[in-house]
Image (spheres, rainbow, N blue to C red):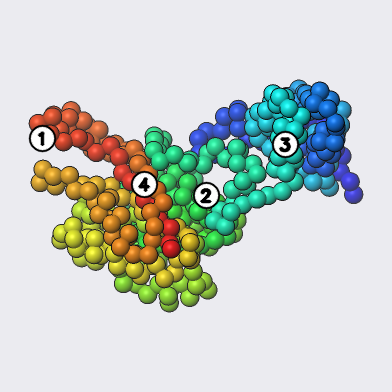
Amino acid sequence: MKAESIKAPPLLKNLGLEAPSLSRVSIILNKAKFIETLEKGITLDNLNLLKNKVTDLKNVIRFYKDKEGILNIDFNGDTVSLRKDVLISELDQILEARTFQRAKYYLDRLKAGVEKVKTNKINDINLLRWKEYDEVVTDSLWVLDKRDTSGAHLGWYWGNFIPQIPHQIILRYTKKAEWVLDPFVGSGTTLIECRRLGRNGIGIELNTEVAIKAKELVQKEPNNFNATSDITVGDSTRIDFKVMLKQKGINKVQLLIMHPPYHNIIKFSKDNRDLSNAPTVNKFLEMFGKVVDSTDPFLEKNRYLAIVIGDKYSKGEWIPLGFYVMGEVLKRNYKLKSIIVKNFEETRAKRNQKELWRYRALVGGFYIFKHEYILIFKKK
Ligand SMILES: C[S@@+](CC[C@H](N)C(=O)[O-])C[C@H]1O[C@@H](n2cnc3c(N)ncnc32)[C@H](O)[C@@H]1O
């Protein structure tokens, strides 16, 4: 039975990293009618006629003056949802074209973006509509000031990372239903993001209490994509990943996210298998190297390893843990794809002692940490 067609222009709000703004509003169109209109434009044989057609289309999108039925959506028909601001800017680009060939080229491109989906092998970003993904960061400097505390992200764990980090990495380096492994899962931030984005997530955590709480929270996060989320208590330097993954019926994962302790900056437990209890930086690096070695066979070739790490300060010296960790990975079968510098969230303790730290820095000839690294590697 054919349902009544909807007359009012249907609008959607996009869910990005930041609060949805008006510019991110999407519009739903009748796909067949929209393509038909674009085709009519493409078959015209002069620039002015083509521009008139595009002006009509722009009026439909901006003022809902719809003669062609582009906004008529019936429940049995196919629809397309487009970012309104991006669509208008694409139509403007056509209107500004100086040659007929150029205008046709832009119109063709717009039609292809509506008709087809083109992705690469490592994510679901539709490259034919790449302009709509402005929530996906591509710069190497990340200034993220507001922690996402929605849903199960409570931020209870001292030493957790800001959810936007795994969010961005998962969007860039996985497709829906693929597998993400985090061998230092802590409070489960990676797994909560996996669930939101429809990826399967496996986490390892040494500390039983932390793992139990993380499991509970991850389960509380709605599971709209029916993703698998699993946390195992264990030591990532020696756990048998082959057996563990086999139990879950998988041979390979498509992304590794590692957020190890920044050596002994925060002591996570009294367990000597905990990387935060490594007696020296060299021992820390050796333990970290073991985690890379034991997880590496299970990462698919040409897929990515992302490491979140900060430096430390000890006995009047800046210890570049981030660079040391990078060196450890580069000794292995990986190539470096990016060094991202991310602003460091001020801890409450540091905020209260701001003046003192500034004084210490002036006296001691050093700078106060304000950044950490996200290192992106690709398996060769
Ligand atoms: C920096 S935290 C990770 C926080 C996590 N990204 C989050 O958002 O909650 C590092 C975690 O690694 C865990 N850890 C340390 N050594 C480990 C090991 N050998 N095997 C597994 N987990 C370990 C610690 O208990 C801690 O929870």
Q: Which residue is mark 3?
A: 105
Front residue (pair 267, 275)? 275
Alpha-carbon span between mark 1 and mark 3 = 61 Å
Three-letter code, disc 1: Gly
> Label 1, on which residue?
364
Q: Is residue 170 visible?
A: yes
How many marks on residues? 4
- Residue 155, percent from left and from top: 38, 45
Q: Position of residue 299 (x, y in %)?
A: 45, 66
**Marked residue nearer the N-terminal end (3 or 4):** 3
The answer to whether mark 3 and mark 4 are in CB contact below 8 A is: no
Mark 2, residue position: 171
As drawn, the label of residue 339 is: 4
Instruction: Quote the CA–CA distance across marks 2 and 4.
Output: 17 Å
Give the CA distance from mark 1 to mark 4: 28 Å
Toward the right, the furthest residue is 1
The crowding category of the residue bearing disc 4, from other C-alpha atoms within 10 Å (few below 14, some 14 to 19, many at least 20), is some
Q: Look at the numbered disc 1 and give the secondary structure of its residue.
A: helix
Looking at the figure, which quarter contains the C terminus?
bottom left
- What amino acid does circle 3 point to? Tyr
Is 100 left, or right, of 145 in this rendering? right
| Quarter assignment of residue 50 | top right
Label 3 – label 4 distance at C-alpha: 37 Å
287 horizontally vs 122: left or right = left
Mark 3 crowdedness (10 Å alpha carbons): few <14, some 14-19, many ≥20: some
Q: Assess mark 3: CB under 8 A from ligand 1?
A: no
Q: Is residue 71 left or right of residue 170?
A: right
Earlier residue among tags 2 and 1: 2
Q: Which amino acid does the dot numbered 2 rest on?
A: Leu
User: Which residue lies at the image location 36% right of the left edge and 40% below the top edge?
Assistant: 342
Q: Secondary structure at mark 3?
A: helix
